[in-house]
């Protein structure tokens, strides 16, 4: 692929950003990404936004947020699926040859949204809304299905929770939450059997911006250096209905990884040094690792993934930022030695209806 | 320069009307998708990726309704994304579909969407929520009052009369008689428009678009597929878009970068699209425009910003019939947004109707000898603008 990352920024993770409007969070993050890349906003030829009206609490959220995201007098498009799908759209724009230097931004101030109410309203009105489906229940159905399919035990899941929090504890870009004990996890209340509260990644406030360019732009600007190349990218949507096959098959998840790896020219996933998974629960984490069968040489979610920070809508793009930092050697305390190829996963919709995977290489 | 040519090879639209009680939202989307596939001679398995066009979901009451539609439009298992830029959504979705193919990563893309605006008791209540909570919510702003203000400013600058806007409505409703899908159509007189109930000065009821339900879809394809399946495609030769600011006050006065009442975002968006498409003299080179015109006052500033005439001259040309079917420039042969406005797909309907003109498939609405057609879309506080140039020849 012909798409490069010039710089990026993540808004400091927080359970509740109380001292800023969403517009200020978005502006601060976009501004910092431009600074990181050494780019003046005037130089940009386009903007891509990934955001959710419903989670932002507005009918057309980009009306107020396009300008803070750098979009004033720019060619700007918004996608509403997830932050990582925003990267897919941004990469397509670069790859088309029509655009060469863009700013991608995504955010989520979940502390301001009635999260599960928004999710419940995603249900169609005839079947799933009357039964009260929401994200926790969808994740509970997923947990039941993968537990049966892969023989995942609750103790496996509880250990995974601790592992994730231990990694997240080292990540200064995350919440650095206290690692719960196994007993605390095992006795935390059920939110949707068999899923317990402490097995879920808590939603947080956050945002991500990336400055992205083409090789054409880079060759004309030798004073700028990319920090990573996007070498593989794939995304896919699956059935809306939560049938057994969709819940436990993980077909979309595995196929998306395979296609991204193929595009990146990898023989298989064993060539990855780092994988950042969008594990919204520890059941996801265990199931994902189970089907990917990654070798010990690959570090999985060294950032802590959503257990470090989970601005739900853009958690996949947070993973992408963490992956870029890994191959750029800028991941700080969670840096994986010698990381050259890193994959970022993002998902969206009930029980991961949509999956996306981006693979980055060092330059 | 795009890496791959992109052409529209199939178009599908449903009938547009206030309520379509015998179809669910996803069935509407399916009807349009099937129509586009049939028109292109393709089946669902021939589609590589899908872009969904949907603006605020609050109108029809299902968040992320696009995900519900996945199975109905045969998108499961494929790359899929939804685009949303308010009223400009359909045009933006088309541009997103365009880059899928132009990148060389996909051969065929289905761009599809649906809306059911009349599901909500009053869309303008939803549209009040688009504004800034602290500064504008309490100002009784919605899309009607918002554009009424800019229309007043345009009238003040150029001396436009309400009768001149009424003439636009008469032409649009007349054109819509040739469009089997149009929501509103008929033979109106200027007096009919002038005597319709006052809504927000200078608007009367007939100056304002309907709240429509319906769906639209187009199939985009690369060279290989286009050559195999279409003898007369509509090539996408130019795309342009521009976002300005939500704050209307920042778009008036001597320091404004883009003048609100002139819809001057289209000057820049059009310049980019024209440059790509090799359009140097739009009056001579473009035969049809499908403008996003939810109000009778929306056409004149767009035509001027897009270079079809000087500032303040569109109203005179309109009076003279220059924008009638087959005249100097055929403006909205379909009847345009004034006659059908399923907001989440209206911009895509503009592209679809422009493509039909280039492909020679516009039926009774067909304008003779169309080589280039222009489609526009507008969203937000008239702050999102995009345009697409479709041509019979690839540039």
Image (spheres, coloured by chain):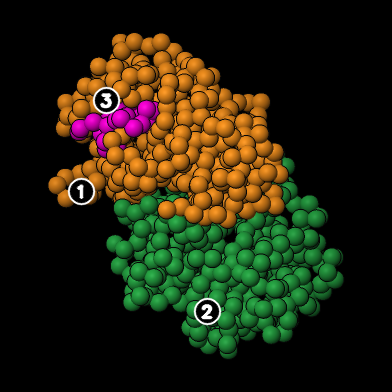
Chain colours: A green, B orange
- Give the percent coordinates (x, y) of residue B126: 45, 39
Chain of the residue where label 1 is placed in the rendered structure: B
Give residue B143's quadrant in the image: top left
Sequence-first tag of 3 and 1: 3
Q: Is residue B345 visible?
A: no
* Residue at the spot of label 3: B202
* Residue at the spot of label 2: A362
Chain of the residue where label 2 is placed in the rendered structure: A
Residue sitting at x 55%, y 54% = B104
In the picture, measured across the screen, residue A213 lies left or right of residue B103, that is left
Q: Secondary structure at mark 2?
A: loop
Q: Which residues are magenta?
A: B283-311
Residue A56, placed above or below residue B22: below
Q: Secondary structure at mark 3?
A: loop
* Residue at the spot of label 1: B256
Chain of the residue where label 3 is placed in the rendered structure: B
Using the numbered discs, state the Cα–Cα distance from disc 2 to disc 3 in whole angstroms: 60 Å
């Amino acid at each position: 692929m012909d798409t490069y990352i010039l710089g990026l920024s993540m808004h400091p993770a927080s359970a509740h950003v109380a001292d800023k409007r969403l517009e200020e969070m978005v502006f601060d993050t976009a501004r910092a990404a431009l600074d990181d890349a050494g780019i003046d906003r005037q130089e940009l030829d386009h903007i891509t936004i990934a955001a959710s009206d419903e989670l932002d609490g507005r009918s057309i959220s980009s009306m107020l947020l396009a300008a803070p995201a750098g979009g004033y007098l720019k060619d700007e498009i918004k996608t509403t699926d997830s932050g990582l799908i925003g990267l897919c759209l941004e990469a397509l724009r670069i790859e088309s040859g029509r655009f060469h230097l863009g700013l991608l931004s995504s955010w989520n101030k979940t502390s301001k949204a009635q999260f599960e109410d928004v999710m419940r309203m995603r249900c169609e009105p005839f079947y799933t809304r009357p039964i009260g489906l929401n994200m926790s229940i969808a994740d509970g159905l997923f947990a039941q299905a993968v537990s049966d399919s892969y023989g995942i035990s609750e103790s496996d899941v509880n250990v995974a929770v601790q592992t994730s929090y231990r990694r997240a504890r080292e990540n200064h870009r995350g919440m650095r939450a206290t690692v719960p004990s196994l007993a605390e996890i095992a006795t935390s209340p059920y939110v949707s059997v068999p899923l317990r509260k402490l097995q879920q990644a808590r939603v947080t406030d956050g945002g991500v911006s990336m400055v992205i360019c083409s090789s054409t732009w880079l060759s004309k600007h030798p004073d700028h250096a990319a920090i990573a190349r996007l070498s593989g990218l794939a995304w896919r949507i699956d059935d809306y209905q939560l049938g057994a096959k969709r819940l436990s098959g993980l077909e979309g998840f595995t196929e998306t990884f395979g296609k991204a790896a193929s595009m990146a020219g990898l023989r298989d996933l064993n060539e990855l040094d780092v994988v950042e998974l969008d594990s919204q629960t520890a059941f996801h984490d265990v199931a994902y690792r189970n089907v990917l069968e990654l070798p010990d040489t690959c570090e999985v979610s060294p950032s802590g993934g959503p257990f470090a920070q989970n601005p739900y809508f853009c958690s996949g793009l947070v993973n992408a930022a963490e992956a870029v930092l890994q191959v750029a050697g800028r991941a700080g305390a969670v840096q994986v030695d010698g990381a050259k190829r890193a994959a970022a996963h993002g998902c969206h919709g009930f029980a991961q209806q949509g999956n996306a995977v981006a693979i980055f290489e060092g330059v | 320069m795009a890496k791959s040519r992109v052409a529209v090879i199939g178009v599908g639209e449903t009938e547009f009307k206030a309520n379509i009680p015998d179809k669910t939202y996803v069935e509407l989307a399916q009807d349009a998708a099937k129509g586009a596939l049939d028109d292109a001679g393709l089946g669902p398995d021939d589609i590589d990726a899908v872009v969904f066009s949907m603006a605020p979901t609050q109108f029809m009451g299902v968040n992320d309704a696009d995900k519900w539609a996945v199975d109905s439009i045969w998108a499961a298992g494929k790359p899929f994304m939804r685009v949303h830029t308010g009223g400009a959504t359909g045009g933006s979705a088309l541009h997103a579909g365009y880059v899928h193919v132009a990148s060389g990563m996909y051969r065929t893309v289905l761009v599809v969407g649906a809306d059911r605006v009349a599901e909500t008791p009053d869309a303008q209540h939803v549209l009040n929520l688009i504004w800034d909570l602290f500064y504008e919510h309490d100002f009784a702003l919605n899309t009607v009052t918002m554009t009424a203000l800019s229309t007043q400013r345009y009238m003040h600058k150029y001396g436009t009369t309400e009768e001149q806007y009424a003439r636009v409505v008469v032409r649009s409703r007349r054109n819509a008689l040739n469009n089997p899908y149009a929501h509103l159509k008929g033979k109106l007189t200027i007096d009919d428009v002038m005597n319709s109930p006052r809504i927000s000065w200078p608007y009367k009821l007939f100056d304002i678009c309907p709240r429509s339900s319906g769906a639209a879809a187009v199939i985009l394809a690369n060279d290989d597929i286009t050559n195999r399946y279409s003898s007369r495609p509509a090539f996408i030769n130019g795309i342009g878009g521009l976002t300005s600011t939500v704050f209307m006050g920042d778009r008036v006065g001597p320091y404004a970068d883009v003048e609100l009442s002139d819809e001057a975002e289209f000057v820049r968006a059009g310049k980019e699209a024209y440059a790509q498409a090799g359009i140097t003299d739009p009056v001579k080179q473009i035969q049809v425009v499908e403008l996003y015109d939810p109000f009778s006052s929306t056409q004149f500033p767009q035509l001027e910003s897009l270079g079809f005439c000087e500032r303040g001259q569109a109203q005179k040309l309109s009076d003279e019939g220059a924008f009638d079917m087959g005249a100097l420039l055929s403006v909205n042969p379909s009847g345009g947004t004034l006659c059908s406005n399923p907001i989440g797909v209206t911009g895509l309907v503009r592209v679809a109707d422009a493509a039909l003109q280039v492909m020679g498939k516009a039926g009774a609405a067909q304008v003779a000898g169309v080589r280039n057609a222009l489609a526009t879309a507008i969203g937000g506080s008239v702050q999102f603008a995009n345009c697409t140039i479709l041509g019979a020849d690839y540039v």
